[in-house]
Structure formats: C-alpha cells, structure tokens
Image (tube, grey):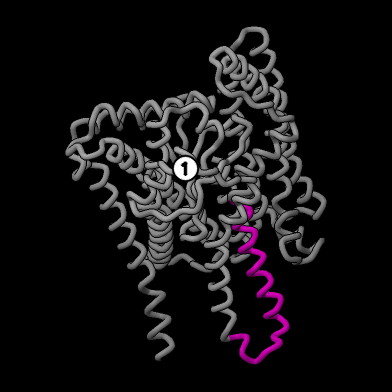
Amino acid sequence: MIQALLVIALIALQVSDQTRVLRLVSWSVPAVWAAAWAPALLLWAIFHVWALRAGRRIDERGDHAAFLRTDAAMLMTRCLGVAWFVFAVTCLGWADVVRRAVGDLILVDEVIILAPLLTQIIGQWWSMFPLEERIAEARLLRSLDRGEPVHAPPTRGGFVLMCLKFQMLLVLLPIGLAAAWNETLRVVGERRPWPWWDRAEPWLQWGGLLVLLATAPALVRLVWGAVKIADGPFRRRAVEVCSQHRVRVRGPFLWRTHGVMVNAAILGPVWPWRYLLVTDALLERMTDSQIEGVLAHEVAHVRERHLLWLAVCVVGVVLACGWATSALAFVLHWDPEGDAFGFGASVFTLAVALHVFGHVSRRFEWQADAFAVKHLSGQSAGVTEEAAGVMGSALANVAYMNGISPRKFTWRHGSIAERERRLAQLVGQPVAGLSIDRKVRVIKWCGLAAAVLGAAPFVWELVWGRAG
C-alpha cells in the first residue's frame, strides 16, 4: 500500500506543477512551512503513542490483535498524511514556497517538498520496530523448536533501512531518475546550445524515459543487495518453470531479508533487465511444490503482460475521464480553464483511476493464482484438488509467516482469504476455459478500447491539426 500512497503524492505534485494551484487560503511563507510539517509530525507522534500502548498490551496480555490494530493505525495515519500533503501542494502552494526558497534545482526541491511525508513514513517504521521485534522473537523461538533455519534479527536502524529499500525506493528510485532526466533536459533546453535541439528534445525525453524504465530494475536489484543463486535443484527448477512458459529472466537471485519476509518477484518489463528474485525465508520455509506454485504465479504476471495491460487500463480511464469532464464543462457552461474546475476534475480523475487500478490489479492477481494452479495440475484436463490445495497453502503460509491476517484487504491484491476461496472454486474446471481468464480478456479489451478512443482526439490534432 505504501507504493500506492507514494504514487498519489507524486501525482499530486505533478498536477500542481502542470496546473495553477487552487489557493483556498492565502498564508504567509512561515505559515505554509508550518502547515506542511506540523500535521506530518503530529500524525507520527500520535502513532508513536499508539505503538507504545500496543507494545504494553502485547507484553501484559499477549494480545497479538494489538499488533494488527497498530498496523491498521499506521495505514490510516499514512492515508491522512498523504491527504494533507495533497492539500498542501494543491491548495496551499507548498511546492511554490519551497521552490522560491531553494530554487528549481534538479531533484533537490522535490526532495524537500516530499520531506514532511517521507519523514512521517520513515518515523512510523522506527516507531513500529519494537512491535516487529516482539513478533520476530516469537518466530525465532518457534523456529528453534521446529529446527528451522534462524537469522539474526535486524537492529532498529537495519529494520528501517530494509523497509526504506524494499518498499519506498521501489517507487522513488525509478520515478526520481525519470524526474532527474526530464529536469536535466529542461535545463539544457533553456540554454538552447544547438540549433537542432528543439527537434531532438522530444526524442531524447521519451527515449531516455524508456531506457530508464527498462534498466531501473537492475539498479533496484543492486540497491536491494540481491545475489545470484548458485547452481542446484532450486535454480534448475526455477529455470525450467520459466522456460516452460517461454518467459526469459535473469537469475534467480536471492533477496536477503534476514528471514523476515516470504516473497518472490520478477522485476523489469523487458529482458535482459528482467530479474527473478526470491527471499531467503521463502526458500527456507516452504515446500518444493509451494515454491513452484509461487514461481508460476510470478511467471504469470510476465506471461500475461499484466503490467502493460494495467498501464493501458489506467491510461484509458484517465483519458476517458478527461474527455468526460470536458464534455460536462461544455454542457453546463463551466470554465474548463478555471482553477476550481481543474482541481475538481483532477480529484475525480484520480479517484476513478485508483478504483480501476485496484479493481484490475486484483483480478490480475486472481488470474496469476489460477495460472499457477494450472501449472501445478500438469497434464490434467481440469484443475486438480491437489494443485489448488498446494497453491492455497502457499498463500496461507505467506500470510502466516509475514504476520498478515488472511482477512486483511489490500488495494492491489485483495485478501488472502478471498484468493484462497477463489482457488477452491477452480477445482474441476477445465484448464483451457477458466472463468477468470475470460474476465481478464474482457478487462483488457475494455482498457484497450478506452485508451484508443481517449487518445484518438490527440492523434487527430497531432496529424490533421498540423496538416491544416
């Protein structure tokens, strides 16, 4: 969820840069600085007190639910922090105030603008560590009793750094590189050193962004400290699963998390900058069949091009919302250039885009689960009960080992309990005609239609406008 919240904050910052700020109030510069920082620090302080009380409840009563409630409180306060950040940049002129103070330096002003929100998020990880430490100690004792591999628990600083690398930088690193590239081109363009620059700049801009999008996973892998897994049974099986479904990846790589995270991921949209990563805890605490199911799930995302189609659907709905709001302004005789209308249209578009993003992403997850079950069913014409059971148990283990309630709902993945229920419904269905595959095909066609129809006026203006 932290990635989605950061994306919302970055979109709000981009919107404030591209449109006029809707000034609801006119405050002095010190007041704007205080308004940007004080709520973020207050939300952190409130959460810190909550975490301290939850720690005492765990110590005195062994109340594991206190940990879950604290995790929910962290999400709630972060949502409030992002909402206030959006208000600050769109209605208080926070970004303008910062840039008047430090200038429009490459990435420097953006870091300062985001600093209150990032401070709140990082501070809450620091406050959450004592609770995470209690849970880690309980897992350590359980692992020792069962003879499972154990890892030295991270320090408080190591825990915060791990969260920063694995959660925050996954979004900020590629987007920051893209922003730095665009700002560099802008600085060069302002000097206009060569007569051919105006013609070359769009190609440099989009070409550079595509290169960064393709190669950013390599940098993420280095930041995460993932190392290549030596030849052995797991490596050979992982390569076999990828080859069976014609998915080319680099690796697999070991994603070192001190044994606190059970996960796998394929980073990168294109080969050779596409990497298969698996965490240490996944290799240590899951059976071979469960690991194979998790690998097949990740392969499905690449095989079905879920990332590309998710982008198509979101872009399509954004374009559709743009034309819908423009048509509404024309019918009601509103000023489409007005600050209030622009702000309202942006909020509406963002809300619809987020809804579509979550709706589509969750169904892609269901399809990836179904793909894994089909893979585990082997040559069977229908989904076997054993395959569904293996994948369901893998999901249950992910929730259990990561300390997540199976009923906890996330915007991108839904809940583990819902995914388990859907897996059970697949038993006996023909492998070649699963209902989720039909639903995803409809989603893809609708997203493509929305993107094409939404982009048509831009293409018309680009081609025929210039011709005229």
Quadrant containing the C terminus is bottom left
Residue 223 shown left or right of residue 72 in the figure: right
**Residue at (46% x, 60% y) in the render:** 270
Please tell me in which quadrant of the rendered image residue 65 appears: top right
**Residue at (50% x, 53% y) in the render:** 250
Front-lying residue, 412 or 22: 412
Residue 369 shown in magenta:
no
User: In the image, residue 428 lies at what x, y percent?
Assistant: 18, 32
Front-lying residue, 297 or 86: 297
**Residue at (43% x, 43% y) in the render:** 236
User: In the image, residue 180 lies at what x, y percent?
Assistant: 67, 65
- Magenta region, mostly helix, strand or loop? helix
Q: Is residue 180 above or below residue 415?
A: below
Q: Is residue 111 above or below residue 463?
A: above
Q: Residues within 10 Å of mark 1 (few under 14, many from 20)?
A: some
Task: Specify the segment rendered in magenta.
Answer: 171-198
Front-lying residue, 60 or 250: 250
User: In the image, residue 280 lies at what x, y percent?
Assistant: 56, 34
Residue 421 shown left or right of residue 90 in the figure: left
User: In the image, residue 251 lies at what x, y percent?
Assistant: 51, 49
Q: Is residue 20 visible?
A: no
Residue occupied by mark 1: 235
Please tell me in which quadrant of the rendered image residue 121 appears: top right
Q: Residue furthest top?
A: 61
Q: Is residue 18 visible?
A: yes
Query: Which secondary structure lies at badge 1?
Result: helix
